[in-house]
Image: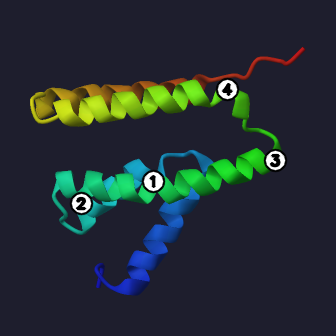
Amino acid sequence: MLNSFPVALAAGIIFGFLSGLGIGGGSLLVMWLTLMLGVNASDARCINLLFFVPCALCASIFRWKQGSLPVRKLPVPILMGCILAGTFSMLSAQLNTALLKKIFGFLLIGTGIRELFYRPRNAK
């Protein structure tokens, strides 16, 4: 039942919506794929990367149209993101995955704690 097209469509819509909001739909997608569908972690990460590309593109276009995407500041982060993603993708085979999982877990916990206590500064 979980592998049926309607369930996959509903999951894609939900995770795409959450990704567009910047909530972390990709992380939830990986958990869905591994825990609910039994996909191995490596395949789930690959699927997540392919899922993220159109989600990020659509969200970026809408943010740009709203005027909240500073286009002039984008080239450096895009370039560095591509370089580092490629570099660490090549290095991932040599890295200790157990250590990476722990580091990622701490990163998620730290980000969650920060979000709980974050207070925006008043704009002057």
Q: Looking at the image, is mark 3 or mark 2 earlier in the sequence? A: 2
Label 4 vs label 2, nearer the camera:
4
Identify which amino acid the numbered label 4 is placed on.
Lys
**Mark 1 to mark 3 CA distance (whole Å):** 21 Å
Q: Which residue is mark 1?
A: 52
Q: Which residue is mark 3?
A: 66
- Secondary structure under badge 3? helix
Residue 63 x/y as whole percent: 72, 47
Residue 101 sits above or below residue 35 on the image: above
Q: Looking at the image, is mark 4 or mark 2 earlier in the sequence? A: 2
Q: Looking at the image, is mark 1 or mark 3 earlier in the sequence? A: 1
Q: Which residue is mark 4?
A: 73
Label 3 vs label 2, nearer the camera:
3
Q: Is residue 42 visible?
A: yes
Relative horizontal placement of residue 23, taking residue 118 as reference (left or right):
left
How packed mark 1 is, by other alpha carbons closer than 10 Å (few <14, some 14-19, many 20 or more), is some
**Mark 1 to mark 2 CA distance (whole Å):** 19 Å
Q: Looking at the image, is mark 1 or mark 2 earlier in the sequence? A: 2
Label 4 vs label 3, nearer the camera:
4
Q: Nearer the viewer, residue 80 or 34?
A: 80
- Secondary structure under badge 4? helix
Q: Which residue is mark 2?
A: 35
Q: Looking at the image, is mark 4 or mark 1 earlier in the sequence? A: 1
**Mark 4 to mark 2 CA distance (whole Å):** 38 Å
Relative horizontal placement of residue 34, taking residue 56 as reference (left or right):
left
Q: Looking at the image, is mark 4 or mark 3 earlier in the sequence? A: 3
Residue 16 x/y as whole percent: 52, 61
Residue 106 sits above or below residue 57 on the image: above
Label 4 vs label 1, nearer the camera:
4
Identify which amino acid the numbered label 3 is placed on.
Gln
How packed mark 4 is, by other alpha carbons closer than 10 Å (few <14, some 14-19, many 20 or more), is few
